[in-house]
Image (spheres, coloured by chain):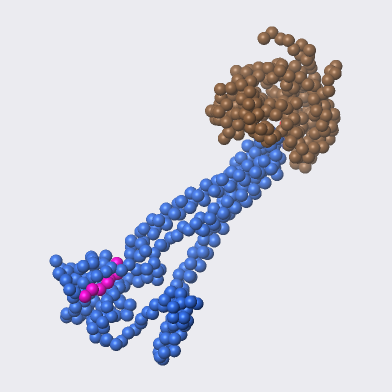
Chain colours: A blue, B brown
Amino acid sequence: MRAWIRRWCALTGAVILTAPVLHVQGQGLRTIAIDERLGMAAGLAVGDSVRFAAMASAPSGQWVRIGAITRRSADPSEIARSEYRVRLHLDQLQSLTGVGDRIGRFAVRTQENAGAPGSASGTVAGPDSVSAAINAMAFGFRAYPAAEVAIETSATFRVVNRFHRAIGIITIVASAIFLLCITLLKVDERRREVGALRLLGLSRATVVRSVMLEASLIALLGSALGAGFGAAASAIVNWYYQGVYATPLRFALVTPEIVAIAVTLSLLLGIVSGYLAAQRLVRTAPLELVGR
Amino acid sequence: MNLTQPVLSARDLRRAYLVAGAPVEAVRGLSLDVHPGEWVAVVGPSGCGKSTLLNLLGAIDRPTSGQLLIRGRDVAVMDDAEATRFRLTGIGFVFQRFYLMPTLSAAENVELPMAEAKRPRAEREARAKELLTYVGLGARTDHRPFQLSGGEQQRVAVARALANRPALLLADEPTGELDARTGEEMIALFDRLNRDGTTIVTVTHDEELAQAARRVIHMRDGVIVDDQVRRPLESVARPA
Ligand SMILES: Nc1ncnc2c1ncn2[C@@H]1O[C@H](COP(=O)(O)OP(=O)(O)OP(=O)(O)O)[C@@H](O)[C@H]1O
Ligand SMILES: [Mg+2]
Protein backbone atom coordinates (compact mmCIF):
# COMPACT_ATOMS: atom_id res chain seq x y z
CA MET A 1 0.00 0.00 0.00
CA ARG A 2 1.60 3.22 -1.15
CA ALA A 3 0.53 6.75 -0.46
CA TRP A 4 2.54 9.62 -1.89
CA ILE A 5 2.27 13.16 -0.81
CA ARG A 6 4.30 16.19 -1.62
CA ARG A 7 4.54 18.79 1.03
CA TRP A 8 6.93 21.56 1.90
CA CYS A 9 8.26 20.95 5.31
CA ALA A 10 10.21 23.32 7.40
CA LEU A 11 12.61 22.37 10.10
CA THR A 12 13.63 24.59 12.93
CA GLY A 13 16.87 24.98 11.03
CA ALA A 14 14.92 26.23 8.00
CA VAL A 15 15.81 23.20 5.94
CA ILE A 16 13.36 22.62 3.13
CA LEU A 17 12.40 19.02 2.68
CA THR A 18 10.18 17.00 0.46
CA ALA A 19 8.71 13.93 1.93
CA PRO A 20 7.64 11.25 -0.49
CA VAL A 21 5.93 8.93 1.89
CA LEU A 22 6.00 5.17 1.72
CA HIS A 23 4.75 2.67 4.22
CA VAL A 24 7.21 -0.21 4.50
CA GLN A 25 8.49 -2.46 7.17
CA GLY A 26 11.07 -0.34 8.93
CA GLN A 27 12.96 -2.00 11.75
CA GLY A 28 16.37 -0.64 12.65
CA LEU A 29 15.77 2.69 10.89
CA ARG A 30 16.62 6.04 12.43
CA THR A 31 13.73 7.97 13.85
CA ILE A 32 12.28 11.37 13.18
CA ALA A 33 9.47 13.30 14.85
CA ILE A 34 6.72 14.91 12.82
CA ASP A 35 4.12 17.34 14.01
CA GLU A 36 0.52 16.41 14.54
CA ARG A 37 -0.69 18.41 11.58
CA LEU A 38 1.53 16.56 9.15
CA GLY A 39 0.48 13.29 10.72
CA MET A 40 -3.16 14.14 10.20
CA ALA A 41 -2.72 15.45 6.67
CA ALA A 42 -0.60 12.55 5.43
CA GLY A 43 -2.24 9.85 7.51
CA LEU A 44 1.01 9.01 9.27
CA ALA A 45 1.33 7.37 12.64
CA VAL A 46 4.16 6.42 14.99
CA GLY A 47 5.98 3.39 13.59
CA ASP A 48 5.37 4.25 9.90
CA SER A 49 8.41 4.36 7.67
CA VAL A 50 8.94 7.16 5.18
CA ARG A 51 11.56 8.09 2.65
CA PHE A 52 13.10 11.43 3.28
CA ALA A 53 14.91 13.79 0.88
CA ALA A 54 16.10 17.38 0.99
CA MET A 55 14.54 18.32 -2.36
CA ALA A 56 11.34 17.21 -4.02
CA SER A 57 13.28 16.39 -7.17
CA ALA A 58 15.83 14.21 -5.40
CA PRO A 59 15.87 10.73 -6.95
CA SER A 60 16.48 8.88 -3.72
CA GLY A 61 16.41 9.60 -0.02
CA GLN A 62 16.84 8.03 3.34
CA TRP A 63 14.37 5.69 4.95
CA VAL A 64 13.39 6.79 8.43
CA ARG A 65 10.81 5.68 10.96
CA ILE A 66 8.41 8.03 12.64
CA GLY A 67 9.35 7.78 16.26
CA ALA A 68 7.17 10.50 17.69
CA ILE A 69 4.41 12.89 16.85
CA THR A 70 4.80 16.33 18.42
CA ARG A 71 2.05 18.67 19.35
CA ARG A 72 2.51 22.39 18.78
CA SER A 73 2.62 24.72 21.73
CA ALA A 74 -0.29 27.03 22.49
CA ASP A 75 1.33 29.88 20.62
CA PRO A 76 -0.97 32.07 18.54
CA SER A 77 1.81 32.79 16.04
CA GLU A 78 1.93 29.07 15.25
CA ILE A 79 -1.61 28.58 14.11
CA ALA A 80 -1.49 30.80 11.04
CA ARG A 81 1.52 28.93 9.61
CA SER A 82 0.49 26.35 7.09
CA GLU A 83 3.92 24.70 7.01
CA TYR A 84 4.66 21.32 8.56
CA ARG A 85 7.46 20.57 10.95
CA VAL A 86 9.84 17.64 11.08
CA ARG A 87 12.50 17.10 13.71
CA LEU A 88 15.52 14.91 13.06
CA HIS A 89 18.79 14.18 14.74
CA LEU A 90 21.39 16.84 13.97
CA ASP A 91 23.88 14.50 12.23
CA GLN A 92 21.17 13.11 10.00
CA LEU A 93 20.01 16.57 9.12
CA GLN A 94 23.58 17.49 8.21
CA SER A 95 24.03 14.48 6.00
CA LEU A 96 20.65 14.93 4.38
CA THR A 97 21.28 18.52 3.40
CA GLY A 98 24.92 17.99 2.53
CA VAL A 99 25.87 21.23 4.28
CA GLY A 100 27.11 19.75 7.48
CA ASP A 101 28.60 22.82 9.07
CA ARG A 102 26.03 25.42 8.20
CA ILE A 103 23.40 26.31 10.72
CA GLY A 104 20.93 29.12 10.30
CA ARG A 105 19.51 29.24 13.79
CA PHE A 106 19.80 27.43 17.04
CA ALA A 107 18.24 27.75 20.43
CA VAL A 108 19.98 27.73 23.80
CA ARG A 109 17.95 26.82 26.85
CA THR A 110 19.22 28.35 30.04
CA GLN A 111 18.61 26.56 33.27
CA GLU A 112 15.69 27.74 35.23
CA ASN A 113 16.69 30.11 38.00
CA ALA A 114 20.18 30.32 36.53
CA GLY A 115 22.03 33.17 38.10
CA ALA A 116 19.81 33.19 41.09
CA PRO A 117 21.71 33.45 44.35
CA GLY A 118 22.69 30.03 45.55
CA SER A 119 22.51 28.33 42.13
CA ALA A 120 24.96 25.49 41.65
CA SER A 121 27.57 27.21 39.52
CA GLY A 122 27.27 30.49 41.30
CA THR A 123 27.68 32.26 37.95
CA VAL A 124 25.27 34.84 36.65
CA ALA A 125 23.74 33.24 33.57
CA GLY A 126 20.23 34.57 32.94
CA PRO A 127 18.88 34.75 29.37
CA ASP A 128 20.03 38.34 28.99
CA SER A 129 23.59 37.72 30.05
CA VAL A 130 23.78 34.54 27.93
CA SER A 131 22.60 36.36 24.82
CA ALA A 132 25.00 39.21 25.54
CA ALA A 133 27.82 36.69 25.87
CA ILE A 134 26.91 35.03 22.56
CA ASN A 135 26.67 38.38 20.79
CA ALA A 136 30.10 39.29 22.02
CA MET A 137 31.55 35.99 20.83
CA ALA A 138 31.61 36.62 17.12
CA PHE A 139 30.69 39.27 14.58
CA GLY A 140 27.44 38.57 12.73
CA PHE A 141 25.89 36.67 15.55
CA ARG A 142 22.68 37.97 16.95
CA ALA A 143 21.11 36.31 19.96
CA TYR A 144 17.73 37.22 21.39
CA PRO A 145 16.22 36.18 24.67
CA ALA A 146 13.04 34.18 24.14
CA ALA A 147 10.97 36.85 25.85
CA GLU A 148 12.11 39.41 23.30
CA VAL A 149 11.24 37.09 20.44
CA ALA A 150 7.86 36.48 21.99
CA ILE A 151 7.19 40.20 22.28
CA GLU A 152 8.14 40.72 18.66
CA THR A 153 6.03 37.87 17.33
CA SER A 154 3.07 38.87 19.45
CA ALA A 155 3.04 42.49 18.25
CA THR A 156 0.22 41.72 15.83
CA PHE A 157 -1.74 40.04 18.55
CA ARG A 158 -1.36 42.99 20.82
CA VAL A 159 -2.85 45.20 18.12
CA VAL A 160 -5.66 42.71 17.64
CA ASN A 161 -6.08 42.62 21.38
CA ARG A 162 -6.40 46.38 21.62
CA PHE A 163 -8.90 46.30 18.79
CA HIS A 164 -10.94 43.69 20.64
CA ARG A 165 -10.82 45.79 23.77
CA ALA A 166 -12.13 48.79 21.82
CA ILE A 167 -14.96 46.68 20.41
CA GLY A 168 -15.69 45.43 23.92
CA ILE A 169 -15.88 48.94 25.35
CA ILE A 170 -18.10 50.17 22.54
CA THR A 171 -20.36 47.16 23.04
CA ILE A 172 -20.60 47.79 26.76
CA VAL A 173 -21.34 51.49 26.35
CA ALA A 174 -23.94 50.88 23.63
CA SER A 175 -25.65 48.10 25.55
CA ALA A 176 -25.59 50.17 28.73
CA ILE A 177 -27.49 52.95 26.96
CA PHE A 178 -29.81 50.39 25.43
CA LEU A 179 -30.44 48.73 28.78
CA LEU A 180 -31.02 52.06 30.47
CA CYS A 181 -33.69 52.89 27.87
CA ILE A 182 -35.28 49.44 28.23
CA THR A 183 -35.35 49.79 32.00
CA LEU A 184 -36.91 53.24 31.76
CA LEU A 185 -39.56 51.90 29.39
CA LYS A 186 -40.21 48.77 31.43
CA VAL A 187 -40.46 50.68 34.68
CA ASP A 188 -42.67 53.24 32.97
CA GLU A 189 -45.07 50.40 32.16
CA ARG A 190 -45.49 50.15 35.91
CA ARG A 191 -46.78 53.71 36.21
CA ARG A 192 -50.18 52.63 37.45
CA GLU A 193 -48.82 50.07 39.87
CA VAL A 194 -46.36 52.55 41.32
CA GLY A 195 -49.07 55.22 41.45
CA ALA A 196 -51.39 52.82 43.29
CA LEU A 197 -48.65 51.90 45.77
CA ARG A 198 -48.00 55.56 46.45
CA LEU A 199 -51.72 56.23 46.91
CA LEU A 200 -51.85 53.39 49.43
CA GLY A 201 -49.11 55.07 51.40
CA LEU A 202 -45.93 53.33 50.27
CA SER A 203 -43.08 55.80 50.52
CA ARG A 204 -40.91 56.99 47.67
CA ALA A 205 -37.95 55.22 49.25
CA THR A 206 -39.83 51.91 49.33
CA VAL A 207 -40.78 52.21 45.67
CA VAL A 208 -37.26 53.19 44.61
CA ARG A 209 -35.75 50.40 46.68
CA SER A 210 -38.03 47.72 45.27
CA VAL A 211 -37.51 48.86 41.68
CA MET A 212 -33.74 48.87 42.23
CA LEU A 213 -33.86 45.47 43.88
CA GLU A 214 -35.79 44.02 40.97
CA ALA A 215 -33.47 45.63 38.42
CA SER A 216 -30.42 44.26 40.27
CA LEU A 217 -31.87 40.76 40.45
CA ILE A 218 -32.63 40.85 36.73
CA ALA A 219 -29.09 42.12 36.10
CA LEU A 220 -27.60 39.32 38.19
CA LEU A 221 -29.71 36.70 36.49
CA GLY A 222 -28.87 38.20 33.10
CA SER A 223 -25.15 38.23 33.75
CA ALA A 224 -25.27 34.63 35.03
CA LEU A 225 -27.09 33.58 31.87
CA GLY A 226 -24.65 35.64 29.79
CA ALA A 227 -21.63 34.06 31.47
CA GLY A 228 -23.09 30.59 30.92
CA PHE A 229 -23.80 31.38 27.30
CA GLY A 230 -20.30 32.83 26.86
CA ALA A 231 -18.69 29.74 28.42
CA ALA A 232 -20.71 27.45 26.15
CA ALA A 233 -19.93 29.53 23.06
CA SER A 234 -16.21 29.65 23.81
CA ALA A 235 -16.17 25.89 24.46
CA ILE A 236 -17.64 25.35 21.00
CA VAL A 237 -15.23 27.85 19.39
CA ASN A 238 -12.24 26.22 21.10
CA TRP A 239 -13.35 22.71 20.22
CA TYR A 240 -13.83 23.65 16.57
CA TYR A 241 -10.66 25.66 15.96
CA GLN A 242 -8.40 23.42 18.02
CA GLY A 243 -9.51 20.71 15.62
CA VAL A 244 -9.00 22.85 12.54
CA TYR A 245 -5.51 24.03 13.50
CA ALA A 246 -4.43 21.00 15.54
CA THR A 247 -3.33 23.22 18.38
CA PRO A 248 -3.95 23.22 22.11
CA LEU A 249 -4.36 27.01 21.88
CA ARG A 250 -7.55 28.28 23.50
CA PHE A 251 -9.13 30.80 21.15
CA ALA A 252 -11.82 32.09 23.47
CA LEU A 253 -11.49 32.48 27.21
CA VAL A 254 -14.09 33.03 29.92
CA THR A 255 -12.00 33.56 33.02
CA PRO A 256 -13.32 34.16 36.54
CA GLU A 257 -12.06 37.75 36.22
CA ILE A 258 -14.12 38.28 33.07
CA VAL A 259 -17.20 36.83 34.78
CA ALA A 260 -16.57 39.04 37.81
CA ILE A 261 -16.26 42.14 35.62
CA ALA A 262 -19.42 41.21 33.71
CA VAL A 263 -21.45 40.61 36.87
CA THR A 264 -20.16 43.79 38.50
CA LEU A 265 -20.85 45.87 35.43
CA SER A 266 -24.35 44.56 34.92
CA LEU A 267 -25.16 44.86 38.60
CA LEU A 268 -23.96 48.44 38.56
CA LEU A 269 -25.97 49.08 35.44
CA GLY A 270 -29.05 47.47 36.99
CA ILE A 271 -28.76 49.54 40.13
CA VAL A 272 -28.15 52.81 38.29
CA SER A 273 -30.85 52.30 35.66
CA GLY A 274 -33.31 51.06 38.29
CA TYR A 275 -32.58 54.11 40.40
CA LEU A 276 -33.01 56.55 37.50
CA ALA A 277 -36.19 54.87 36.29
CA ALA A 278 -37.69 54.76 39.77
CA GLN A 279 -36.77 58.39 40.46
CA ARG A 280 -38.59 59.43 37.32
CA LEU A 281 -41.75 57.75 38.60
CA VAL A 282 -41.72 58.80 42.22
CA ARG A 283 -41.22 62.44 41.28
CA THR A 284 -44.53 62.30 39.43
CA ALA A 285 -47.69 62.84 41.47
CA PRO A 286 -49.37 59.47 42.20
CA LEU A 287 -52.70 60.68 40.81
CA GLU A 288 -50.97 61.49 37.54
CA LEU A 289 -49.38 58.04 37.52
CA VAL A 290 -52.63 56.13 37.87
CA GLY A 291 -54.33 58.31 35.27
CA ARG A 292 -57.69 59.87 35.78
CA MET B 1 -76.43 66.88 66.85
CA ASN B 2 -73.50 64.62 67.32
CA LEU B 3 -71.49 64.80 70.47
CA THR B 4 -68.48 62.79 69.37
CA GLN B 5 -65.39 64.43 67.88
CA PRO B 6 -65.61 64.32 64.07
CA VAL B 7 -63.17 61.98 62.31
CA LEU B 8 -63.01 64.48 59.54
CA SER B 9 -63.62 68.20 59.53
CA ALA B 10 -63.36 70.37 56.42
CA ARG B 11 -63.76 74.15 56.45
CA ASP B 12 -64.10 76.26 53.32
CA LEU B 13 -62.11 73.72 51.33
CA ARG B 14 -61.05 74.82 47.84
CA ARG B 15 -59.16 73.11 45.07
CA ALA B 16 -58.40 74.88 41.79
CA TYR B 17 -56.76 73.33 38.73
CA LEU B 18 -54.90 75.35 36.18
CA VAL B 19 -56.55 74.61 32.86
CA ALA B 20 -54.88 76.36 29.92
CA GLY B 21 -53.35 78.88 32.31
CA ALA B 22 -56.63 79.81 33.98
CA PRO B 23 -57.64 78.46 37.40
CA VAL B 24 -60.74 76.28 37.41
CA GLU B 25 -62.20 75.52 40.84
CA ALA B 26 -63.31 71.90 41.19
CA VAL B 27 -64.12 72.27 44.88
CA ARG B 28 -65.35 75.73 45.85
CA GLY B 29 -65.55 76.46 49.56
CA LEU B 30 -66.85 73.19 50.90
CA SER B 31 -67.39 72.49 54.60
CA LEU B 32 -68.15 69.06 56.01
CA ASP B 33 -67.94 67.04 59.23
CA VAL B 34 -67.92 63.25 59.33
CA HIS B 35 -68.34 61.48 62.66
CA PRO B 36 -67.12 58.06 63.73
CA GLY B 37 -69.41 55.27 62.54
CA GLU B 38 -70.95 57.29 59.73
CA TRP B 39 -71.31 56.07 56.16
CA VAL B 40 -71.47 59.00 53.80
CA ALA B 41 -72.25 58.67 50.09
CA VAL B 42 -71.28 61.66 47.95
CA VAL B 43 -73.34 61.84 44.75
CA GLY B 44 -73.73 64.38 41.98
CA PRO B 45 -73.36 64.87 38.26
CA SER B 46 -70.15 64.02 36.50
CA GLY B 47 -67.50 66.69 36.91
CA CYS B 48 -69.06 68.25 40.02
CA GLY B 49 -65.88 67.61 42.01
CA LYS B 50 -66.62 64.36 43.89
CA SER B 51 -63.30 62.68 43.14
CA THR B 52 -61.44 65.90 43.78
CA LEU B 53 -63.07 66.11 47.22
CA LEU B 54 -62.31 62.48 48.03
CA ASN B 55 -58.66 62.94 47.03
CA LEU B 56 -58.45 65.91 49.36
CA LEU B 57 -60.08 63.96 52.20
CA GLY B 58 -57.60 61.14 51.67
CA ALA B 59 -54.47 63.34 51.73
CA ILE B 60 -53.80 62.30 48.14
CA ASP B 61 -54.23 65.85 46.94
CA ARG B 62 -53.72 69.14 48.75
CA PRO B 63 -56.33 71.91 48.94
CA THR B 64 -55.58 75.26 47.35
CA SER B 65 -57.02 76.84 50.50
CA GLY B 66 -59.14 75.97 53.49
CA GLN B 67 -58.66 73.72 56.47
CA LEU B 68 -58.91 69.96 56.63
CA LEU B 69 -58.55 68.10 59.90
CA ILE B 70 -58.57 64.32 59.97
CA ARG B 71 -58.50 62.85 63.47
CA GLY B 72 -57.41 66.30 64.59
CA ARG B 73 -54.43 66.47 62.24
CA ASP B 74 -54.15 69.23 59.65
CA VAL B 75 -53.76 67.45 56.35
CA ALA B 76 -53.38 70.65 54.33
CA VAL B 77 -49.97 71.46 55.79
CA MET B 78 -48.41 68.01 55.54
CA ASP B 79 -45.44 67.56 53.24
CA ASP B 80 -45.30 64.63 50.83
CA ALA B 81 -43.61 62.20 53.23
CA GLU B 82 -46.01 63.03 56.06
CA ALA B 83 -49.04 62.75 53.81
CA THR B 84 -47.77 59.39 52.51
CA ARG B 85 -47.34 58.09 56.05
CA PHE B 86 -50.75 59.43 56.98
CA ARG B 87 -52.37 57.63 54.04
CA LEU B 88 -50.64 54.42 55.05
CA THR B 89 -51.83 54.31 58.64
CA GLY B 90 -54.77 56.69 58.86
CA ILE B 91 -56.81 56.08 55.75
CA GLY B 92 -58.00 53.07 53.76
CA PHE B 93 -58.62 53.45 50.03
CA VAL B 94 -60.78 51.46 47.67
CA PHE B 95 -60.44 52.47 44.04
CA GLN B 96 -62.75 51.90 41.12
CA ARG B 97 -60.07 49.88 39.33
CA PHE B 98 -58.92 47.83 42.38
CA TYR B 99 -55.20 48.50 41.81
CA LEU B 100 -54.04 45.15 43.13
CA MET B 101 -50.42 44.16 42.49
CA PRO B 102 -50.69 41.51 39.77
CA THR B 103 -47.61 39.56 40.89
CA LEU B 104 -48.73 39.21 44.49
CA SER B 105 -51.27 36.79 45.95
CA ALA B 106 -54.44 38.07 47.60
CA ALA B 107 -52.87 37.66 51.05
CA GLU B 108 -49.65 39.40 49.97
CA ASN B 109 -51.65 42.29 48.56
CA VAL B 110 -53.36 42.69 51.91
CA GLU B 111 -50.04 42.39 53.72
CA LEU B 112 -48.38 45.06 51.61
CA PRO B 113 -49.51 48.15 53.61
CA MET B 114 -48.73 46.29 56.86
CA ALA B 115 -45.23 45.46 55.62
CA GLU B 116 -44.68 49.11 54.78
CA ALA B 117 -45.87 49.97 58.29
CA LYS B 118 -43.25 47.50 59.58
CA ARG B 119 -45.71 45.14 61.24
CA PRO B 120 -44.17 41.78 62.21
CA ARG B 121 -44.63 38.99 59.69
CA ALA B 122 -46.72 36.74 61.94
CA GLU B 123 -49.12 39.57 62.70
CA ARG B 124 -49.37 40.48 59.01
CA GLU B 125 -50.18 36.95 57.98
CA ALA B 126 -52.76 36.49 60.71
CA ARG B 127 -54.46 39.81 59.94
CA ALA B 128 -54.47 39.20 56.17
CA LYS B 129 -56.09 35.82 56.72
CA GLU B 130 -58.62 37.34 59.11
CA LEU B 131 -59.51 40.20 56.75
CA LEU B 132 -59.78 37.97 53.70
CA THR B 133 -62.05 35.65 55.66
CA TYR B 134 -64.11 38.69 56.68
CA VAL B 135 -64.65 39.70 53.04
CA GLY B 136 -65.48 36.08 52.15
CA LEU B 137 -62.21 35.08 50.50
CA GLY B 138 -60.72 32.93 53.24
CA ALA B 139 -60.21 30.09 50.79
CA ARG B 140 -58.60 32.25 48.11
CA THR B 141 -55.66 33.76 50.01
CA ASP B 142 -53.04 32.27 47.70
CA HIS B 143 -54.79 33.24 44.49
CA ARG B 144 -53.37 35.96 42.32
CA PRO B 145 -55.55 38.81 41.02
CA PHE B 146 -55.89 37.29 37.53
CA GLN B 147 -57.38 34.18 39.13
CA LEU B 148 -60.09 36.26 40.82
CA SER B 149 -63.26 37.84 39.43
CA GLY B 150 -63.72 41.61 39.48
CA GLY B 151 -65.93 41.40 42.58
CA GLU B 152 -63.40 39.20 44.35
CA GLN B 153 -60.56 41.55 43.43
CA GLN B 154 -62.50 44.47 44.83
CA ARG B 155 -63.07 42.53 48.06
CA VAL B 156 -59.31 41.92 48.30
CA ALA B 157 -58.89 45.68 47.82
CA VAL B 158 -61.32 46.31 50.70
CA ALA B 159 -59.36 43.90 52.91
CA ARG B 160 -56.14 45.70 51.94
CA ALA B 161 -57.70 49.09 52.75
CA LEU B 162 -58.50 47.87 56.28
CA ALA B 163 -55.08 46.30 56.89
CA ASN B 164 -53.63 49.07 59.07
CA ARG B 165 -56.95 49.72 60.92
CA PRO B 166 -57.57 53.17 59.38
CA ALA B 167 -59.85 55.72 61.01
CA LEU B 168 -61.58 56.30 57.70
CA LEU B 169 -62.38 54.17 54.66
CA LEU B 170 -62.60 56.11 51.39
CA ALA B 171 -64.00 54.59 48.21
CA ASP B 172 -64.25 56.22 44.78
CA GLU B 173 -66.87 54.41 42.68
CA PRO B 174 -66.18 51.04 44.35
CA THR B 175 -68.92 49.39 42.29
CA GLY B 176 -68.02 51.22 39.08
CA GLU B 177 -66.32 48.23 37.43
CA LEU B 178 -68.69 45.60 38.79
CA ASP B 179 -71.90 44.14 37.35
CA ALA B 180 -75.18 44.64 39.21
CA ARG B 181 -74.96 41.43 41.26
CA THR B 182 -71.37 41.75 42.40
CA GLY B 183 -72.13 45.43 42.99
CA GLU B 184 -74.85 44.40 45.43
CA GLU B 185 -72.45 42.05 47.19
CA MET B 186 -70.01 44.93 47.54
CA ILE B 187 -72.76 47.16 48.99
CA ALA B 188 -73.61 44.41 51.47
CA LEU B 189 -69.93 44.23 52.46
CA PHE B 190 -69.77 48.00 53.03
CA ASP B 191 -72.94 47.78 55.07
CA ARG B 192 -71.47 45.03 57.22
CA LEU B 193 -68.22 46.99 57.63
CA ASN B 194 -70.13 50.08 58.70
CA ARG B 195 -72.27 48.13 61.18
CA ASP B 196 -69.06 46.73 62.61
CA GLY B 197 -67.90 50.29 63.21
CA THR B 198 -65.96 51.42 60.12
CA THR B 199 -66.40 55.05 59.12
CA ILE B 200 -66.91 55.19 55.35
CA VAL B 201 -67.05 57.92 52.71
CA THR B 202 -67.98 56.71 49.22
CA VAL B 203 -68.26 58.67 46.02
CA THR B 204 -70.66 57.11 43.58
CA HIS B 205 -73.04 57.23 40.66
CA ASP B 206 -74.54 53.97 41.89
CA GLU B 207 -78.05 54.75 43.14
CA GLU B 208 -78.21 51.54 45.17
CA LEU B 209 -74.92 52.26 46.90
CA ALA B 210 -76.14 55.75 47.78
CA GLN B 211 -79.44 54.31 49.10
CA ALA B 212 -77.54 51.95 51.40
CA ALA B 213 -75.47 54.73 53.00
CA ARG B 214 -76.59 56.39 56.25
CA ARG B 215 -76.03 59.87 54.93
CA VAL B 216 -76.16 61.17 51.33
CA ILE B 217 -74.45 64.38 50.23
CA HIS B 218 -75.37 65.90 46.87
CA MET B 219 -72.74 68.01 45.17
CA ARG B 220 -73.00 70.40 42.26
CA ASP B 221 -70.27 72.57 40.80
CA GLY B 222 -67.87 71.98 43.65
CA VAL B 223 -70.22 72.67 46.55
CA ILE B 224 -72.65 70.68 48.70
CA VAL B 225 -76.23 71.38 47.68
CA ASP B 226 -77.94 68.78 49.83
CA ASP B 227 -76.96 66.80 52.94
CA GLN B 228 -79.42 64.17 54.23
CA VAL B 229 -79.09 61.75 57.08
CA ARG B 230 -81.20 58.73 56.07
CA ARG B 231 -80.34 56.42 58.92
CA PRO B 232 -79.07 58.13 62.03
CA LEU B 233 -76.33 56.40 63.96
CA GLU B 234 -78.77 55.49 66.75
CA SER B 235 -80.99 53.35 64.52
CA VAL B 236 -78.43 50.69 63.88
CA ALA B 237 -80.88 47.85 64.31
CA ARG B 238 -82.29 46.57 61.06
CA PRO B 239 -83.97 43.30 60.08
CA ALA B 240 -81.25 40.87 59.02
N1 LIG C 1 -55.95 67.11 37.23
C1 LIG C 1 -56.89 67.94 36.76
N2 LIG C 1 -56.54 68.95 35.96
C2 LIG C 1 -57.48 69.79 35.50
N3 LIG C 1 -58.76 69.69 35.78
C3 LIG C 1 -59.18 68.70 36.58
C4 LIG C 1 -58.25 67.76 37.11
N4 LIG C 1 -58.95 66.89 37.86
C5 LIG C 1 -60.22 67.25 37.80
N5 LIG C 1 -60.37 68.32 37.03
C6 LIG C 1 -61.61 69.01 36.77
O1 LIG C 1 -62.25 69.25 37.98
C7 LIG C 1 -63.64 69.02 37.87
C8 LIG C 1 -64.08 67.98 38.88
O2 LIG C 1 -63.50 66.72 38.53
P1 LIG C 1 -63.79 65.41 39.38
O3 LIG C 1 -62.96 64.34 38.80
O4 LIG C 1 -63.59 65.72 40.80
O5 LIG C 1 -65.29 65.16 39.08
P2 LIG C 1 -66.23 63.95 39.52
O6 LIG C 1 -67.38 64.53 40.23
O7 LIG C 1 -65.43 62.93 40.23
O8 LIG C 1 -66.69 63.38 38.13
P3 LIG C 1 -67.04 61.88 37.74
O9 LIG C 1 -68.37 61.60 38.35
O10 LIG C 1 -67.12 61.91 36.27
O11 LIG C 1 -65.96 61.03 38.28
C9 LIG C 1 -63.89 68.61 36.43
O12 LIG C 1 -64.30 69.75 35.72
C10 LIG C 1 -62.54 68.16 35.97
O13 LIG C 1 -62.40 68.38 34.59
MG1 LIG D 1 -64.84 60.89 39.85
Left of A163 or right of it: where is B165? Answer: right
User: Is A247 in front, or is B121?
Assistant: B121
Residue A252 shows in this picture: yes
Q: Is residue B107 above or below residue A52?
A: above
Image quarter of residue B22: top right
Determine the residue positioned at 62% across, 51% down: A272
Residue A258 placed where, x, y %?
51, 58
Is B164 situated left or right of A180 in this image?
right
Q: Please give the range of residues in magenta.
A: A30-37
State which quarter of the image contains the N terminus of chain B. Answer: top right
Question: Residue B13: where, in percent of width, then height?
Answer: 82, 31
Residue B43 visible somewhere in the drawing: no
Residue shown at the point (23%, 73%) measured from the top left:
A31
Q: Residue at x 80, y 34 (%)?
A: B75
Instruction: Name, please, the residue furthest toward the top.
Output: B239
Percent position of residue B208, x then y: 68, 17
| Left or right of residue A112, residue B62 in this image | right
Which quadrant is home to the C terminus of chain B?
top right
The majority secondary structure of the magenta stretch comes to: strand
Up the image or down, B5 lies above or below A243; here it is: above
Q: How many marks?
A: 0
Is-magenta flag for residue A33? yes
Residue B69 in the magenta stretch? The answer is no
